[in-house]
Image: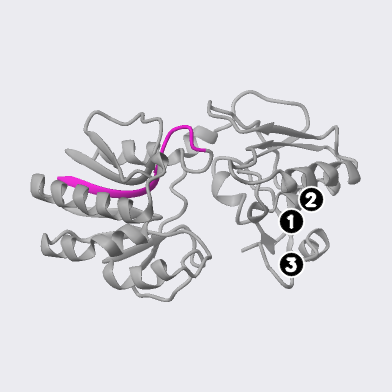
C-alpha cells in the first residue's frame, strides 16, 4: 500500500509544524511508500520509505510557480506509483487543486482540518474529500456528514512525566500566541498558591513579541514571577513533572481546549465551571473552554 500526503510544512525545526514529521514517520510504518508534497520544506528527518517534494515556498517562489510545481510533481508521482489514499494535512488547497487528477486515478482524499477559520478551501474541500477528520466536534467550521472526530493524535508518551518536584507543577506546551490563551492559566494560578507553571514555546517567526510581553507583564501584575518559567521554544524532549489530583474537584468541570489535548497522561487541571467567568473576562463573548 502507498500513501500520498499533502502537508503545509515539513521541517523538524519549524516552531509550529515540526510534529508533522513524527506523523509522517508513524504513517510510514503502515505503508510501503509515503510520498509527501509540501508547501515548504526545511530540515528533513523522515523514514527511509518516505520521499518529500516541496513546491518551493521556502525558496520564495511565486504562487503561479508553486502551482505549476505542484501539478508537475503530482502528475509525475501519479504516473510513477499507484496510491491507495491521499491524506491532506491542513492543506485543503492542495486537495482541491489535485482532486481532478486524483479522481482520475481513483485515489480517495481524506482532509485533516483543525481550525476555526471558515476559509474557502475548507468550505469546498468537504465536497471533494471522502472524509474530513479533526480533533474536536467544533474544530471544523462547516457541517458535513463526512466529519470524523479523532482527537489530537498527540504522542502521549512524549509528554509522560518523569521524576518529581515539590509542590504542584503544570507544563503548558504551545507557541506564544493569543489563540492559546496562556493568560487563563496564569489567572488560574492565582487560585492555586502552591502551584507553579512552565511555559514551553516561543513567539513564532514573523510575529512580534507583543503577546509574550503581555504575558510577562501579567505575570508580574499577578505576583507570579517566582512561579512562572518561560522556557522559550524547545526542539529536544521536555518532560512535564507529575501533577496532583485536580485541585478543584467538581462534578461540573471545564478543561481548557488548548491545554487538554496535550495532557492525556497527566491529571487534568480542572476548574469548577462557576470559576471560569472570573478567570477569563471574555468568557461570555468568546468562550474558550469546551
Looking at the image, which residue is at 53% across and 29% down? 235
Image coords of residue 85 (percent x, y):
21, 54
Secondary structure of the residue carrying tag 3 is: loop
Secondary structure of the residue carrying tag 1 is: strand
Looking at the image, which residue is at 31% across and 51% down? 65
Query: Residue 64 sits in which quadrant?
Result: bottom left
**Could you say which is closer to the camera, residue 51 or residue 197?**
51
Point out the tag, 1 or 3, that comes first from the N-terminus.
Answer: 1
* Image quarter of the N terminus: top left
- Residue 162 vertical position relative to residue 192 in the rendered view, above or below: above
Front label number (3 vs 2): 3
Decide: few, some or many residues near mark 2? Use Cα within 10 Å; few <14, some 14-19, many ≥20. some
Q: Main secondary structure of the magenta part?
A: strand
As measured in the structure, the alpha-carbon distance from the residue carrying label 1 to the one carrying label 3 is 14 Å
The disc label shown at residue 135, or none: none
The answer to whether the residues at label 3 and label 2 have Cβ atoms under 8 Å apart is no
Is residue 3 in the magenta section?
yes
As measured in the structure, the alpha-carbon distance from the residue carrying label 2 to the one carrying label 1 is 8 Å
Q: Which residue is mark 1?
A: 271
* Image quarter of the C terminus: bottom right
- Residue 8 vertical position relative to residue 265 in the rendered view, above or below: below
The answer to whether the residues at label 2 and label 1 have Cβ atoms under 8 Å apart is yes
The disc label shown at residue 188, or none: 2
In this rendering, position of residue 103 left or right of residue 207: left
Point out the tag, 2 or 1, that comes first from the N-terminus.
Answer: 2
The answer to whether the residues at label 1 and label 3 have Cβ atoms under 8 Å apart is no
Q: What segment carries the magenta color? A: 1-14
Front label number (2 vs 1): 2
Q: Which residue is mark 3?
A: 283
Looking at the image, which residue is at 68% across and 67% down? 287
Amino acid at each position: 500500500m502507498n500513501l500520498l500526503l499533502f502537508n503545509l510544512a515539513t521541517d523538524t525545526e519549524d516552531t509550529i509544524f515540526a510534529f508533522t514529521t513524527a506523523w509522517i514517520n508513524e504513517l510510514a510504518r503502515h505503508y510501503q511508500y509515503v510520498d509527501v508534497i509540501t508547501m515548504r520544506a526545511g530540515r528533513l528527518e523522515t523514514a527511509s520509505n518516505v520521499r518529500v517534494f516541496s513546491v518551493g515556498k521556502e525558496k520564495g517562489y511565486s504562487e503561479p510557480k508553486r502551482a505549476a510545481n505542484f501539478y508537475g510533481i503530482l502528475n509525475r508521482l501519479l504516473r510513477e506509483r499507484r496510491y491507495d489514499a491521499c491524506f491532506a494535512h491542513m492543506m485543503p488547497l492542495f486537495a482541491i487543486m489535485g482532486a481532478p487528477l486524483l479522481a482520475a486515478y481513483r485515489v480517495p482524499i481524506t482532509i485533516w482540518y483543525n481550525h476555526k477559520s471558515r476559509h474557502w478551501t475548507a468550505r469546498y474541500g468537504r465536497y471533494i474529500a471522502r472524509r474530513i477528520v479533526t480533533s474536536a466536534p467544533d474544530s471544523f467550521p462547516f457541517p458535513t456528514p463526512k466529519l470524523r472526530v479523532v482527537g489530537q493524535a498527540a504522542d502521549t508518551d512524549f509528554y509522560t512525566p518523569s521524576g518529581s518536584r515539590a509542590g504542584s507543577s503544570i507544563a503548558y506546551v504551545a507557541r506564544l500566541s493569543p489563540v492559546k490563551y496562556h493568560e487563563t492559566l496564569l489567572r488560574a494560578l492565582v487560585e492555586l498558591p502552591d502551584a507553579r507553571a512552565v511555559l514551553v514555546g516561543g513567539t513564532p517567526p514573523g510575529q512580534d513579541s507583543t503577546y509574550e510581553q503581555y504575558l510577562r507583564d501579567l505575570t508580574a501584575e499577578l505576583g507570579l514571577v517566582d512561579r512562572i518559567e518561560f522556557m522559550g521554544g524547545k526542539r529536544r524532549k521536555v518532560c512535564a513533572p507529575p501533577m496532583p489530583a485536580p485541585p478543584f474537584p467538581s462534578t461540573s468541570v471545564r478543561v481548557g481546549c488548548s491545554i487538554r489535548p496535550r495532557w492525556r497522561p497527566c491529571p487534568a487541571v480542572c476548574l469548577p465551571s462557576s470559576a471560569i467567568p472570573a478567570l477569563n473576562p471574555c468568557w461570555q463573548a468568546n468562550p474558550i473552554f469546551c
